[in-house]
Amino acid sequence: MGARFNEAGRGRNVFSQAIRPMLLAAGQDDVGRLRWDASADGCARRGGAAQSGAMPYAPALPTIAEAIQASLSPVFMLTGIGALLNVLTGRLARVIDRARVLEERHPALQRDDRTRAADELRRLARRMKVINASLFLAVASAVATCTVVGMLFVGALTHYHIGQWVAFSFILAMSLLIAAFVAFMVEVRLSIHAIRVRDELLR
């Protein structure tokens, strides 16, 4: 019995010695495969990151459509500013024509008429200053509005966060437009006071 156990133990030792190199080789192959897969995965990730970083940013079509929709309100505001500029330009032209007529008649007028003509010329000069100020404010508001439209598209086409600048430019455009309307109201009041019929002509 002892001899049999000894032979069985020897057989096991021989089998273990014969199979151990095979197991070690298989283990090294598995480790190598794992290392190869990990390195390939890392290279693929780095390559994808490099490709994603190298590709330029291309906005989607819905993003551009949203930018166009957002710019519609400033565009309508530009239309109103254009109408205001047209009115102011017409009023300024009439004031200038009236001032030129009075300047031509001034040397030939009597003393009383000359005094009234000088007073009217002063009012006309004041109206021209107010109209010019209103024109300047309206044009500045139009420039700020165009800046808003441009920044809306810049923000949509790039990664820049310029929301605060867009809001500031729109507030500035509205403030300038309000000031232009106030100046226009002042000019209307001046024109109403200038157009007065003398009492002696109504008798």
Image (cartoon, rainbow, N blue to C red):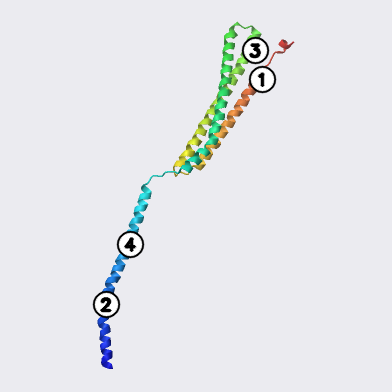
Q: What amino acid is at disc 3?
A: Arg
Instruction: Report x, y in % for residue 78.
Output: 54, 31
- The residue wearing badge 1 is 193
Tally the numbered discs.
Answer: 4
Closer to the camera: disc 3 or disc 2? 2
Q: What amino acid is at disc 1?
A: His
Q: What amino acid is at disc 4?
A: Asp
Q: How far apart are marks 3 and 2 (CA)?
A: 127 Å
Instruction: Report x, y in % for residue 54.
Output: 36, 47
- The residue wearing badge 4 is 37
- What residue lies at 63% left-to-right and 26% top-to-bottom? 185
Quadrant of the image occupied by residue 7 = bottom left
Vertical relation: 188 (above or below) 164: above
Instruction: Report x, y in % for residue 16.
Output: 27, 80
Q: Earlier in the sequence, mark 3 or mark 1?
A: 3
Closer to the camera: disc 3 or disc 1? 1
Closer to the camera: disc 2 or disc 1? 2
Q: How crowded is mark 3: few (under 14 residues within 10 Å), some or many (20 or more)?
A: some
Q: Distance between the residues labelled 4 and 1?
A: 91 Å
Element type where label 1 sits in the image:
helix
Instruction: Report x, y in % for residue 165.
Output: 50, 40
Q: Which of marks 3 and 2 is nearer the N terminus?
A: 2
Q: Residues within 10 Å of mark 4 (few under 14, many from 20)?
A: few
For the residues labelled 2 and 4, say whether their Cβ atoms are less than 8 Å apart: no
Front position in the image: 113 or 69 = 69
- The residue wearing badge 2 is 19
Q: Which of marks 2 and 4 is nearer the N terminus?
A: 2
- What residue lies at 62% left-to-right and 15% top-to-bottom? 120
For the residues labelled 4 and 3, say whether their Cβ atoms are less than 8 Å apart: no
Q: Distance between the residues labelled 2 and 1?
A: 117 Å
- The residue wearing badge 3 is 116
Quadrant of the image occupied by residue 111 = top right
